């Protein structure tokens, strides 16, 4: 395994999506509300496939076994086969009785794993996978190996939460491919299992920084979070959920009291500049976003981490750094900023800032007592920016599925 040096949000710097539609405050708020708080019985944005084993808890698997006339412990065996042994097909559950396997298959149960369509390895050991979903859509997931001070390898999985993304951050490659649908929880979990299989190593950290805006698919993201923590055994504190900001969702996330990191992609120290980089910010004023971050800390005692993609000549001046420090001090203490020097993508006018500019920006923040880290670009030669690899292999623009559109009427209306 090759050694690498930093985390993944780097790859996220590239999440950009031209939603073939304008996105208003109302549509974002309603979409978020629909995805995170659909009452039971209401149609969720992407209905969970009821016969998929992946994503089910040990208790649910035990109940399933009992319901099918088996002993309780068969459920535990199912759990081991799915999450520890990572068996992909029910027919390969070799230490279950043949009759039980047949019964599961006849009842339509399947594991819910998808094939890996392409694997691209970068010189620094980063591996990007393209996973082909049941409806032939491709999603990206990235594994990043890093060596800690003791020489042990720590593996980070950067996972996607949507097929494409309906937001259109101006620097992001994902958006160039459009938006199709939300991922189901098991389609998020399987990305982590695929990374573990590929590296033959346990995943230590999971970051929701791949394709898509997690807060627009909060229900599935929270289901996947539960499964990753309880079933795949990734520590809650080792999971980061990233967002550019969707109205009304940070509060909802806080109410679940998960002990994971919230990473907010700021990319600008003021509203005007932010709107030009993150168009969806028009619906979420900076002060409202910062207030929600402050409340999130008060509610969860977990500090928010801020991501800042440095774009040469756009937001990387020392004055921007001073303004950013003022903004962060105004809304809290002890904030942490991750600076992400832009990773060039096809079809973008943005340029990567010079090392000097990055270092000057970081120094201004440090001198104002803001903790800073600079993300090292990973896997440049592996189409590392989020969405780039998918765009290479799935040329046709994504269009939202009809049933997803029916369940997101407010989005459909404004687009
Ligand atoms: S929210 Fe993320 S995936 Fe979506 S366009 Fe913005 S940067 Fe890209």
Image (tube, rainbow, N blue to C red):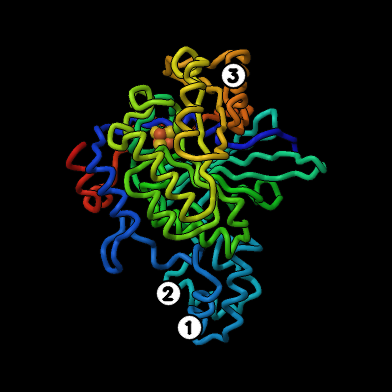
Helix, strand or loop for disc 3 = helix
- Of callouts 2 and 1, which one flags the residue occurring earlier in the amino acid sequence? 1
Which residue sits furthest left?
Answer: 413
Q: Where is residue 184, by image quadrant?
A: bottom left
**On the image, numbered disc 1 is attached to which residue?**
68
| Total residue callouts | 3
Q: In this view, does 406 lie to the left or right of 250?
A: left
Helix, strand or loop for disc 2 = loop
Frontmost of labels 3 and 1 is 3
Which quadrant, please, contains the N terminus?
A: top right
Q: In this view, does 118 lie to the left or right of 415?
A: right
Which quadrant, please, contains the C terminus?
A: top left
Find residue 369 and report its horizontal and vertical position in percent: 60, 30
Decide: few, some or many residues near mark 1? Use Cα within 10 Å; few <14, some 14-19, many ≥20. Answer: few
Question: How far separated are the C-alphas under marks 2 and 1?
Answer: 10 Å
Find residue 213 and report its horizontal and vertical position in percent: 40, 42
Q: Is there a contact, CB below 8 Å, between mark 3 and mark 1?
A: no
Location of residue 310 with respect to 4 vertically, above or below: above
Q: Nearer the viewer, residue 13 or 191?
A: 13
Q: Is there a contact, CB below 8 Å, between mark 2 and mark 1?
A: yes
Decide: few, some or many residues near mark 2? Use Cα within 10 Å; few <14, some 14-19, many ≥20. Answer: few
Q: Where is residue 166, by image quadrant?
A: top left
Tell me which image quadrant ligand 1 sits in: top left
Location of residue 144 with respect to 62 vertically, above or below: above
Question: How far separated are the C-alphas under marks 3 and 2?
Answer: 57 Å
Does any portion of residue 149 appear in the rendered image?
A: yes
Q: Nearer the viewer, residue 387 or 101?
A: 387
Q: Residue at x 50, y 17 (%)?
A: 316
**On the image, numbered disc 2 is attached to which residue?**
107
């Amino acid at each position: 395994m090759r050694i690498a040096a930093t985390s993944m949000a780097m790859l996220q710097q590239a999440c950009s999506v031209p939603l073939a539609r304008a996105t208003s405050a109302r549509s974002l708020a309603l979409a978020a509300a629909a995805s995170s708080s659909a009452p039971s019985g209401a149609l969720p944005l992407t209905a969970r496939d009821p016969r998929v084993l992946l994503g089910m808890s040990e208790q649910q698997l035990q109940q399933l076994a009992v319901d099918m006339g088996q002993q309780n412990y068969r459920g535990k065996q199912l759990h081991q086969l799915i999450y520890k042994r990572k068996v992909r097909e029910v027919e390969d559950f070799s230490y279950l009785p043949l009759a039980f396997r047949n019964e599961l298959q006849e009842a339509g149960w399947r594991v819910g794993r998808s094939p890996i369509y392409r694997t691209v390895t970068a010189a620094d050991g980063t591996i990007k996978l393209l996973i082909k979903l049941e409806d032939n859509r491709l999603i990206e997931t990235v594994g990043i190996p890093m060596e800690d001070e003791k020489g042990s390898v720590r593996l980070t999985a950067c996972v996607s939460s949507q097929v494409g993304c309906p937001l259109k951050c101006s620097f992001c490659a994902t958006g160039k491919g459009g938006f199709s649908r939300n991922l189901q929880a098991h389609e998020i979990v399987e990305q982590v299992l695929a990374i573990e299989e590929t590296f033959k190593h346990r995943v230590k950290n999971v970051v929701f920084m791949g394709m898509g805006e997690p807060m627009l698919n909060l229900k599935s993201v929270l289901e996947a979070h539960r499964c990753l923590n309880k079933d795949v055994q990734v520590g809650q504190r080792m999971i980061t959920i990233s967002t550019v900001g969707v109205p009304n969702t940070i509060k909802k996330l806080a109410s679940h009291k998960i002990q994971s990191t919230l990473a907010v992609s700021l990319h600008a120290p003021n509203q005007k500049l932010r709107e030009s980089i993150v168009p969806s910010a028009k619906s979420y004023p900076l002060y409202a976003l910062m207030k929600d971050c402050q409340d999130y800390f008060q509610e969860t005692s977990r500090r928010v981490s801020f991501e800042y993609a440095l774009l040469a000549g756009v937001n990387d001046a020392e004055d921007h750094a001073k303004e950013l420090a003022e903004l962060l001090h105004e809304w809290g203490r002890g904030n942490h900023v991750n600076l992400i020097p832009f990773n060039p993508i096809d079809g973008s006018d943005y340029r990567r800032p010079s090392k000097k500019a990055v270092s000057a920006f970081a120094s201004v923040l440090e001198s104002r007592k803001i903790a800073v880290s600079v993300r090292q670009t990973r896997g440049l030669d592996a189409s590392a920016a989020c969405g780039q690899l998918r765009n290479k292999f799935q040329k046709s623009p994504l269009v939202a599925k009809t049933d997803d559109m029916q369940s997101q009427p407010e989005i459909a209306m404004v687009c």
